[in-house]
Amino acid sequence: MIRRFYKDVSVAEVSGGWQVMLDRRGLKTVGGAPQIVPTQTLAQALAEEWARQGDKIDPADLPLRDMADYALDVVAQQKAALAQQLTAYADTDTLCYRADPDEPLHARQGDVWEPLVADFEARTGLKLVRVSGIIHRPQEPRVLAALETRLGCEDHFVLAGLEVMTKLAASLVTALLALDTNEEPGALALWQAACLEEEWQAELWGRDWEAEERRARREADFLRAWRFAQAARGG
């Protein structure tokens, strides 16, 4: 921790967007670039992190700051590569890989996951391959190409949030559905659906508090990334 070095926190509209001001000095990223974000909503969320710091600054309590820095210093320079990397998750998407049809889990997956995949297909016009068992079956190249194009069109702040959500859920479908969800309960429901197999195992064998704590942390990270992406869109 470091001693707090500022008194006032404010938000200012600047060329290219919005910026948090500490004693009227604009913040910069770790890489030294001005930390200018696309919306006032996101800038206000960043300012709240700085305003709630006490006499000492806890870097761990500035997660949105870290995401904004990552979006500006890394994602903005590597958008095409990141879009390609995230598209690969669609090829092994959690929601498309089901248990064998004779296993009880298969029915639960169908009940929970199939409506989500069908909704995704209706929204995008893309048809996804469902797989039962562990043998990999790739998605069609045109589907992956369309998803990569979609991701490449996203703002780098939104893409930073999508990356976190996709990796936590092991599901690009979940992340993109969450991005189109305006209410946090909807995003939470999508996260919980992605955790179906973990919940199934817990119901069968009992709950382990360490595993539950890890999942709770991942849930918090997923929802924070969702809020970041929504704020970057002005929501």
Image (spheres, helix red, strand yellow):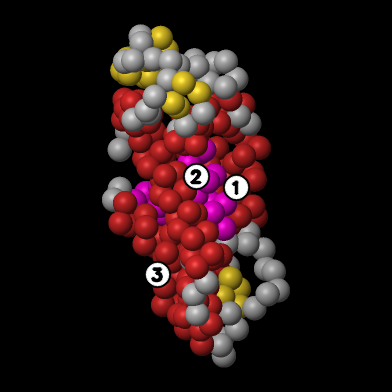
Element carrying mark 2: helix
Amino acid type shown at disc 3: Pro
Q: Which mark is residue 115?
A: 3
Q: Are marks 2 and 3 in contact (CB under 8 Å)?
A: no
Q: Main secondary structure of the magenta part?
A: helix
Visible residue check, residue 122? no
Amino acid type shown at disc 1: Leu
Q: Which residues are magenta?
A: 159-181
Q: Are marks 3 and 1 in contact (CB under 8 Å)?
A: no
Q: Is residue 159 above or below residue 110?
A: above
Q: Position of residue 81 (x, y in %)?
A: 66, 37
Q: Position of residue 204 (x, y in %)?
A: 51, 84
| Foreground residue among 218 and 233 | 218
| Foreground residue among 119 and 21 | 21
Residue picked out by circle 1: 86
Q: Which mark is residue 162?
A: 2
Amino acid type shown at disc 2: Leu
| Crowd around label 1: few <14 · some 14–19 · many ≥20 (10 Å) | many
Element carrying mark 1: helix
